Amino acid sequence: MQDDEKPELRRLPLFREMTTPTFDSLMQIACSQSFPQQVELIRQGEYADFLHIVIEGSVELHASWNGRDTVMGVIHPVSTFILAACVCDAPYLMSARTLECAKIVMIPVADVRVALRRDPDFAMAAMRELANGYRGFVRQTRNLKLRNSIERLAAYILYRSRHAGDSDSIVLPVEKRHLASYLGMTPENLSRSIKSLQADCLTVQGMRFTITDRTRLMEIASPDSLMDEPVESPAKSAFSRLAG
Amino acid sequence: MQDDEKPELRRLPLFREMTTPTFDSLMQIACSQSFPQQVELIRQGEYADFLHIVIEGSVELHASWNGRDTVMGVIHPVSTFILAACVCDAPYLMSARTLECAKIVMIPVADVRVALRRDPDFAMAAMRELANGYRGFVRQTRNLKLRNSIERLAAYILYRSRHAGDSDSIVLPVEKRHLASYLGMTPENLSRSIKSLQADCLTVQGMRFTITDRTRLMEIASPDSLMDEPVESPAKSAFSRLAG
DNA sequence: CGATGAATTGAGTCACATCAACTCTAGTGG
DNA sequence: CCACTAGAGTTGATGTGACTCAATTCATCG
């Protein structure tokens, strides 16, 4: 665990309000590790051993069942994941793999739990983190059940635009087939959906999308504060913020 | 707030571990109220004013957007809901309405927050509650994205069966059109899906379903501990446990 | 440059939605 | 006790969004 990484972690909502002794004790035990791309960090069904924090690179959460697989979300720096499994001492409901090379800080769950019990402010922060994660998945469920695939794509593009400071030009943070899976469609269908938006309100060059008619795009997506993830700090997550 | 309701509340995971003074102070402020059926208890977009606890009857959580509406879950006694909105001090992401006559205990959010700050054990319990709620929605997202509609129905029937102590005979706790919406399909399609299961492994008389070939039903649903809600205490919730 | 995997495109199919008609059931009032 | 009614549930016909499969193009990299 390098000293220069600590201030960054300290700034995380989860660690911001905890006492310095608790933070320091966690940092003493924490270790950071670099992983190459496409490495399975955690496997669904296994028990939580470490709380993970992404420092660099990005990590994809996905779930599989009966030979099918779907992307549940992507974690970008600096964010924690699988907090819920740590708190519940229960098996992971999702797998996680690195998309690019990633530096991950890991804190043993036992120590996290001790810190939670000792430091009420940390417990409060964890509570808020989980509440936000909960709300994130409520949003995702709304999105899946209420919007069709083109509407979801349009909403995603607007989300990325807000993320880039309301710029009309965005660059996809992940491959299209991953985005397709996240949005609950096949790569072929995403391709067709993009094409149909190109006729309307979008120009596309590879991973770069440029919004040419924002009004039209908003007509399609009907952005809604109860469904679309708010953008807290600029340029952080690819899909959505997921706490647990 | 009647005295005979308190022990029941005290037994809830959320209130079980808190100190007696904290519990008593909350109970002093709490008020219970009876509502007729089909009453809108909370509306999505409004800010949390009270933490709600269902004592009797059942409450449906639903979300609407652009004229479409979908059932997100149903709360049965004795459970809390909208904890997440209380914790975050943010607008509700879902609406709630009574399905039948219902008795609801309401605690002002301000008092809940004071109690959270004062009583670390309560904060820990709230954290666990939210973590469980988070995991519930992860499960729901998995279910929606990985299973098709017949598989979801089959899994739901098996879930209800487990809930009834692994009985082969279950009775739907809600109307079919609500179930259809919860499962992410139209009433017509639910009807057809039920029919196709009747050919295989089910007999149906109104709201009563009897499993005639459990092996076949399990083949269809492929029950999975990472997707299907565990049944904690017998006969409690209709769809799934939702914390926030 | 080939080679590999991603992205796109088109054709055919399937799952699911829509619309409309009909049945069934429960509740109401004569 | 029996029409009558209203709403849930079912059924069938039809339409459409989305998936599958196969072929092709495109991008990236050794």
Image (spheres, coloured by chain):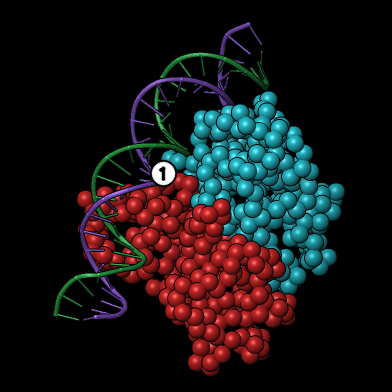
Chain colours: A cyan, B red, C purple, D green
Depth order, front residue of A233/A126: A233
Q: Residue at x 50, y 51 (%)?
A: A145
According to the picture, the residue beneath numbered tag 1 turns out to be A66
Residue A106 visible: no
Residue A129 visible: yes
Q: Is residue B178 left or right of residue A79?
A: left
Q: Residue at x 57, y 47 (%)?
A: A72
Q: Mark 1 — on which chain does it sit?
A: A
- Quarter of the figure with the C terminus of chain A: bottom right
Name the spot of residue A68 as percent of width and height, x first: 45, 41
Q: Amino acid at mark 1?
A: Asn
Q: Give the answer, above or below, for where A202 lies relative to A118.
A: above
Q: Give the answer, above or below, for where A187 lies relative to A183.
A: above
Name the spot of residue A111 as percent of width and height, x first: 69, 63
Depth order, front residue of A61/B205: B205
Q: Residue at x 47, y 50 (%)?
A: B144
Total count of labels: 1
Name the spot of residue B183 as percent of width and height, x first: 42, 55
Name the spot of residue A243 as percent of width and height, x first: 65, 56
Mark 1, other Cα within 10 Å: few <14 / some 14–19 / many ≥20: few
Depth order, front residue of A84/B191: B191
SS for tag 1? loop
Q: Residue at x 77, y 42 (%)?
A: A166
| Extreme residue toward the bottom, this view | B3
